[in-house]
Image (cartoon, grey):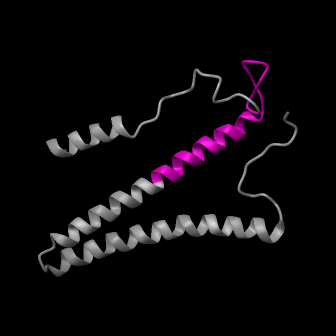
Amino acid sequence: MNKPSCFLFLVSCFLFTKPVLAQSTTSWSGRCVQHGDVATIQGFECLFANILQVIVTIAGLAFFFMFISGGFKYLTSSGDEKKLATASSTLTMAIIGLVGVIASWLIMNFIQKFTGVNVTTFEIPGGP
């Protein structure tokens, strides 16, 4: 990596990170942890919600960086057909990925409206 890329990577790591709350029970209170520090099977609900939040964030960042990268390649292609095809392919794949993520969410909402089953939340029965 060259120096500007390393600098941008380090700056983004410090600007876009969230504090780690693994040792704090406040983020796990309620359905996930009962009686102070005893984990329950409902802890998988919180784990699933956290994993889903990370995946959606990564998908959004991937779209953003692919779109910026494709736009930069498109601007610097200087009329070269091979570079232009690569740039347009990058832009197309970025848009297809974003449409795929949005379509999956819309399909889940459609299933929820059509069947009445709440498929957008992960819940294990038997909790408090």
Q: Which x, y percent locates residue 124? A: 80, 43
- Above-or-below relation of 6 to 21: below
Which residue is pictured at 28% across the width and 38% down the height? Answer: 11
Extent of the magenta region: 31-58
Q: Residue furthest right?
A: 126
Most foreground residue, 26 or 49: 26
Q: Residue furthest left?
A: 78
Most foreground residue, 99 or 2: 99
- Quarter of the image for residue 30 reads top right
Which residue is pictured at 77% across the width and 29% down the height? Answer: 40
Which residue is pictured at 18% across the width and 81% down the height? Answer: 81
Relative horizontal placement of residue 8, taking residue 25 as reference (left or right): left
Relative horizontal placement of residue 97, taking residue 42 as reference (left or right): left
- Above-or-below relation of 45 to 24: below
Q: Which x, y percent locates residue 117? A: 82, 61
Q: Which x, y percent locates residue 1? A: 19, 44
